[in-house]
């Protein structure tokens, strides 16, 4: 992944990279709270979904043998190409 501090990266790309990093950090913190540790085989799955309303990244925990809990973080770009505000 390119450096988001680089001036040649378009503004939207910079915002999306930052939003995805924050979403991943939030999900990892939530996973740690409920004991879904990487040492026990838990990873973050990133899924990209396209629709008429825009584009959405859905990040959620995944394990090869365990059922996944209902935890996720989302990053969205609307149909006009704007990053939808992140939750606080």
Image (cartoon, rainbow, N blue to C red):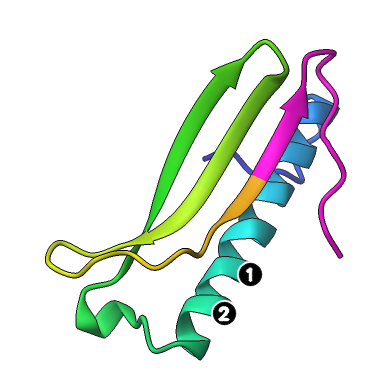
Figure check: 24 above or below 53: below
Q: Residue at x 82, y 51 (%)?
A: 86
Q: Quadrant of residue 13?
A: top right
Q: Residue at x 29, y 71 (%)?
A: 42
Figure check: 25 above or below 23: below
SS for callout 2:
helix
Residue 5 placed where, x, y %? 77, 46
What residue does disc 1 label? 26
The image quadrant where one finds the C terminus is bottom right
Figure check: 23 above or below 65: above
Residue 6 placed where, x, y %? 75, 39
Residue at the limit of the structure toward the left, as seen here: 65
Res. 8 in view: no
Figure check: 28 above or below 60: below
What residue does disc 2 label? 29
Q: Residue at x 34, y 83 (%)?
A: 37
Measure the alpha-carbon separation of dots 2 and 1: 5 Å
In the rendered structure, the answer to whether residue 34 lies left or right of residue 67 reads: right
Res. 69 in view: yes
Residue 4 placed where, x, y %? 71, 43
Q: Residue at x 22, y 83 (%)?
A: 40
Magenta range: 75-88
């Amino acid at each position: 992944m390119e450096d988001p501090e680089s001036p040649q990266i378009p503004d939207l790309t910079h915002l999306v990279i930052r939003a995805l990093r924050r979403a991943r950090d939030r999900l990892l913190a939530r996973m740690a709270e409920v004991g879904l540790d990487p040492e026990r085989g838990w990873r973050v799955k990133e899924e990209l979904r396209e629709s008429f309303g825009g584009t959405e990244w859905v990040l959620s925990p995944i394990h090869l043998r365990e059922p996944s809990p209902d935890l996720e973080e989302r990053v969205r770009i609307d149909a006009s190409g704007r990053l939808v505000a992140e939750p606080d």
